[in-house]
Image: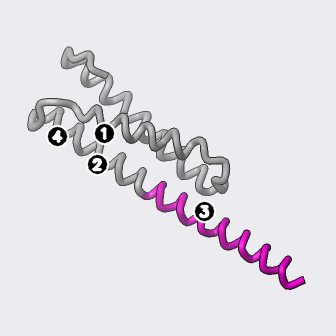
Amino acid sequence: MANIGNKVYRQTQTKQEDAAQVDQQLVRLEEEIRKLKIDFDIFFNGSSKRPPLEARARLESSMKRIADDRNLTYAQRYQFNALVSRFSSYRELWRRTLKARGEDLV
């Protein structure tokens, strides 16, 4: 009987650890979006020669990795969708700005 209770406790503990890990990934994702926005602002102001396309690709791959996670809670899914929406609006802004400058890199 004690073995069954112990198993339930371990399952609950691993779910809490998974949720905490996903929360940390979402915080990192938000920081990466903020840094990428700053990098693009620096590029558009002329301080940088090349747009930060590699950083954008890394961010998109980490977003895909999180999107594939089936263990997200509703709150985590809501926060993730808000971050994806923010990134999509920034990406569209960067694409239009690059197109207006005559650079077809994105």
Q: Secondary structure at mark 1?
A: helix
Residue lying at 47% horizontally and 61% vertically, measured from the top left: 24
Q: Earlier in the sequence, mark 4 or mark 3?
A: 3
Q: Where is mark 3, residue-wise?
A: 18
CB atoms of marks 2 and 1 within 8 Å = yes
Q: Earlier in the sequence, mark 2 or mark 1?
A: 2
Could you tell whether 101 is left or right of 8 in the image? left
CB atoms of marks 1 and 4 within 8 Å = no
Q: Within 10 angstroms of label 4, few (less than 14), some, or many (20 or more) residues?
A: some
Q: Where is mark 2, residue-wise?
A: 35
Q: Secondary structure at mark 3?
A: helix
> Real-space Cα distance between discs 2 and 3?
26 Å
Q: Earlier in the sequence, mark 2 or mark 3?
A: 3
Q: Magenta segment, which residues?
A: 1-27
Q: Within 10 angstroms of label 1, few (less than 14), some, or many (20 or more) residues?
A: some
Instruction: Give above or below for 4 relative to 102.
Output: below
Q: Where is mark 1, residue-wise?
A: 55
> Real-space Cα distance between discs 1 and 4?
14 Å
The secondary structure that dominates the magenta segment is helix
Q: Nearer the viewer, mark 4 or mark 3?
A: 3
> Real-space Cα distance between discs 1 and 3?
26 Å
Q: Earlier in the sequence, mark 1 or mark 4?
A: 4
In the rendering, which numbered label is found on residue 16? none
What's the amino acid at mark 1?
Ala
Could you tell whether 35 is left or right of 3 in the image? left
Could you tell whether 91 is left or right of 37 in the image? right
Q: Nearer the viewer, mark 2 or mark 3?
A: 3
